[in-house]
Amino acid sequence: PLLEQFFTPELVRMAQPALHLTEEQQSTLQEALDRVEPHLAQTRKLLERENRRLLEMVKPDKLDSAAVMAQADRVLHLQTAPQRATLALLLRIRDILTPEQQAKLKEFKSRSAAFQARIRQASKLAAKWKAQGRDLSSFEQARQHFEALMSAGDFQAAETLLDNTLKGLKAPPAAPKR
């Protein structure tokens, strides 16, 4: 529930054409991403190392409980660091966006969630087509067009395209030409 109040970098990128981000917003967003990504990678490596160290500490029959607890505290602290960094990034993204842009993103998220079941259905039908050796080029074109419409914020056209694509995918194969 808490994270639903924020916008991921991926969501902002997908909806960027509809958001009309200023150059300053784009730059600030990129700087925030550039700062957090190396920190997250470094923390993941450190966490792996400290987890291995903790595992080695609990293997012997006789344990040094105080040392194990101290190492467990280090691991637990490292586990929360990526979550804190991610939350800081999400807060920064929200600060960068205007109320109007946030409203567009909320609508984008809502519409995207509403489409998810139909998108999964279309993907399953496309997989069946592929298994049958049918041509998927029209599906691929529709998928790319759908993504462009969603990015542009044209939800009505995206929904119409999705519904038409589903109808096409449900249609039986055309009879071979004689």
Image: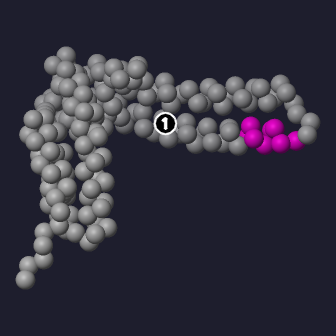
Q: Is residue 98 above or below residue 178?
A: above
Foreground residue, 177 or 4?
A: 177
Task: Say above or below: 14 vs 177.
Answer: above
What range is drawn magenta here? 53-60
Snapshot quadrant of residue 56: top right
Residue in the picture at 28% in, 18% down: 95
Relative to 164, 34 lies left or right: right
Q: What element carries label 1?
A: helix
Residue 151 found in image quarter: top left
Quarter containing the N terminus: top left
The image shows residue 34 at horizontal and vertical percentages of 37, 37
Q: Where is residue 46 in the image (x, y as percent from the top left)?
A: 61, 39
Question: Secondary structure of the magenta portion, mostly?
Answer: helix
Question: Dot 1 corresponds to which residue?
Answer: 40
- Image mark count: 1
Question: Which residue is the extreme one toward the top?
Answer: 99
* 129 and 3: which is toward the camera: 129
Q: Of residues 136 and 168, which is closer to you in this image?
A: 168
**Label 1: few (<14), some (14–19) or many (≥20) C-alpha neighbours in 10 Å:** some
Indicate left or right for 60 with 54 as reference: right
Residue pictured at 33% horizontal, 31% vertical:
8
Asked if one can make out residue 136 in the rendered structure from this viewpoint, the answer is yes
Q: Which residue appears at 41% of the width and 19% of the height?
A: 2
Residue 140 position within the rendered picture, expressed as x and y whole percent measured from the top left: 19, 58
Rendered image quadrant of residue 98? top left
Residue 33 percent coordinates (x, y): 35, 34
The C terminus - image quarter: bottom left
Does residue 27 appear in the picture of this structure? no
